[in-house]
Amino acid sequence: MDKMSFLGLVLAVGFILYGILSSGSIFTFIDLPSVYITIGGTFGALLLSTKGKNAKTLFKLFSLVFKENKSNDEEIINNLVEWSMKARKEGLLSLEDTIETISDSFIKKGMMMIVDGAEPDTIKNVLGLKIRGIIERHKSNRGMFDTGAALGPAFGMIGTLIGLVNMLKTLSDPSTIGPQMSVALITTFYGSLLANVVFMPMSKKLKAKTEEEVYQKEMIIEGLLSIQAGENPNTLREKMLSFLDDKTAKKMELMNSKEGEK
């Protein structure tokens, strides 16, 4: 689980609840018709504006926000260096046995092309197209959250207008103005919560995850091309470390130096 995403959601909801409870009762902010209008209307319009295949992944996307990226940069770099050493000693065809042990489809595709003797430009173009496909699919899926962020406040306003109409119908009774106005504003509150606590932050997080994945895959492409070119494994390692932040790179260098002393 992505602990930062979970912590962020808990803090956002927690502080809002604290603000409500410190100044009144939670029941003041609970109104089922407003929930139906805002949440039901938002999701209904979201499904209406989305392709069928994307709509099926909507609820899966919510879980992806809290899912930790399993790919480990350090492990990938170590594997690339190991494969580079094997290729230099035994030739590129020796990597054929290694391919079956690779679970990552992106790396596996690149390794298969290396073994098959594909040109470097061909490998780079094919894997680049796969990256472009990832970006476009993620952008399309993330677009549902962006749409939800726009629809939430809009349906909140619709609920507010409905509440104001009901208030004006009973304007002759001053005792109903306060309660009706309160209900009218609650829908706007719900719409703002949907946009600023759910859809917008989750869209930003998915975008960050996509950028992280793309950056990692660009690193993998450089590593695979270095293996094919027969570069020295130490040179390959240094090239891969340049993709990491300074702290992680120094940590890996320290680990490698300790292993070399053994």
Image (spheres, rainbow, N blue to C red):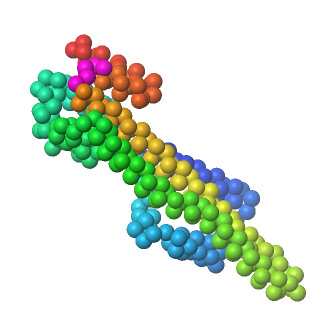
Residue 85 seen in the figure: yes
Q: Is residue 231 magenta?
A: yes
What residue span does the magenta drawing correspond to? Answer: 230-235
Compared with 142, 96 (above or below) is above
Q: In this view, does 105 lie to the left or right of 19?
A: left
- Kindly indicate the quadrant of the structure image that contains residue 44: bottom right
Query: Which x, y percent locates residue 62?
Result: 46, 59
The quarter of the picture where the C terminus appears is top left
Compared with 27, 7 (above or below) is above
In terms of depth relative to the viewer, which is nearer, 106 or 32?
106
Query: Which x, y percent locates residue 69?
Result: 38, 45
Q: Does the magenta stretch include residue 156?
A: no
Which residue is depicted at the point 28% across and 28% down? 226
- Kindly indicate the quadrant of the structure image that contains residue 188: bottom right
Q: How many marks?
A: 0
Which residue is depicted at the point 35% across and 21% down? 238
- Kindly indicate the quadrant of the structure image that contains residue 97: top left
In terms of depth relative to the viewer, which is nearer, 177 or 24?
177
Which residue is depicted at the point 62% across and 76% down? 37
Q: Residue furthest top?
A: 261
In terms of depth relative to the viewer, which is nearer, 15 or 87?
87
Compared with 169, 29 (above or below) is above
Q: In this view, does 162 lie to the left or right of 51?
A: right
Residue 186 seen in the figure: no
In terms of depth relative to the viewer, which is nearer, 208 or 214?
214
Q: Is residue 24 left or right of residue 173?
A: left
Q: Is residue 234 left or right of residue 96?
A: right
Query: Which x, y percent locates residue 108?
Result: 23, 43
Which residue is depicted at the point 62% across and 63% down? 150
Query: Which x, y percent locates residue 234?
Result: 28, 19
